[in-house]
Amino acid sequence: MTYLEINEKIPEGEKILGFLKTQSYTRILDKPKFSIQDAQADTNGIAIKFNELAKNWKTETAGYSIVSHKYTNKNYLAIIGMGLAGIPVVPLILKDLERGPEFWHYALKNITNENPVPKEDINNLVKIQKAWLDWGRKKNLI
Amino acid sequence: MIKDPASIKEMTPGQLHKWWPNLSSSNHHITSSQNILYNCVAWISDITDENIDFSQDENGDLVNDLSAAPYVSYFEKSGFKKCSNADLETGFEKIALFETPNGNFEHVARQLENGHWTSKLGEYEDIEHYDLQSLENTRYYGHAVIFMQRPV
């Protein structure tokens, strides 16, 4: 899958709602009228859904050696989609990152449009972890 | 209760078999603990604190070329040259690069002096496997199709 194809999979605006529906965001979608505001306010539901997606992502990609598989996994893209929709997943990602190094850089960068990781550290998960946790603390997100 | 996603780090031998159905107790043994910090390419280069991954650029964005070409170039800089097979040959160290049918690079293994192979399996353990077929499958790693060697 190419970078352009991946970008096409990350929805924006109204497309995000449909995308989340395809990812079985059922707890919120069960409501008669679903809105982004509903999703943003449902803190516990967000955490449950995030943990489900994160667990599936890790399970489905742990055997791969190459990050392209990790970053294009449907669960990972769903988390990015939630973030782009304004659903507060970044604190949950940072919380997961506090537990240990993980491949969250691509998601955090695409959701926040920021990149605190120096280019020379892009292959070092420990340094990436530290850079994003420092960033999160400065933003009072953790 | 909210499940902790970090709990999936507790891998089992059954999970190895799920990823690599050809692996069995008779064709491999585990030689390290699990480690997310380095991948198979780094392992070939004796690096255990970083990944070496040409599917992303220096900003962490994915690149278009997912082929084995940049990995072949990388190993050539370490003295490897393409060769025709994975047979054990005195005086040479060999590596085998795995590709999927659509030509994407997936894995690399290094031959040991006893003819067995050593591999880092994604975020899982390092293993010594007794042949290349034990890691081959169409769904994940594809097949060993590129062989390289360098003098030892």
Image (cartoon, rainbow, N blue to C red):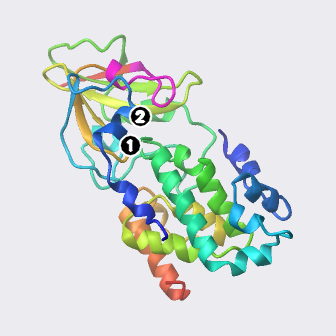
Which numbered circle lies on residue B96? none
Q: Residue at x 33, y 38 (%)?
A: B14
In the structure shown, which secondary structural element does the residue marked by tag 1 occupy? loop
Chain on which label 2 sits: B
C-alpha separation, residue under disc 2 versus residue under disc 1: 10 Å
Q: Which residue is mark 2?
A: B19
Count the marks: how many? 2
Residue B42 picture location, percent across and down:
33, 44
Establish if B133 lies above or below A139.
above
Q: Residue at x 36, y 19 (%)?
A: B147
Q: How many neighbours does mark 1 have within 10 angstroms: few (below 14), some (14-19), or many (20 or more)?
A: many
Q: Is residue A38 left or right of residue B134?
A: right
The amino acid type found where label 2 is placed reads Trp
Pointer 2 and pointer 1: residues touching (CB < 8 Å)?
Answer: yes
Q: Is residue B29 left or right of residue A137?
A: left
Q: Earlier in the sequence, mark 2 or mark 1?
A: 2
Residue A24 picture location, percent across and down:
69, 55
Q: Is residue B143 left or right of residue A35?
A: left
Q: Is residue B27 left or right of residue A122?
A: left
Which quadrant is the C terminus of chain B positioned in? top left
Establish if A59 lies above or below B84.
below
Q: Which residue is mark 1?
A: B122
Q: Quadrant of residue B12?
A: top left
Residue B103 picture location, percent across and down:
56, 25
The amino acid type found where label 1 is placed reads Gly
- B85 vs A62, nearest the viewer: A62
Chain on which label 1 sits: B
Residue B91 picture location, percent across and down:
15, 18
Q: Quadrant of residue A12?
A: bottom right
Which contiguous range is marked in magenta? B133-146
Looking at the image, is mark 2 or mark 1 nearer the viewer? Answer: 2
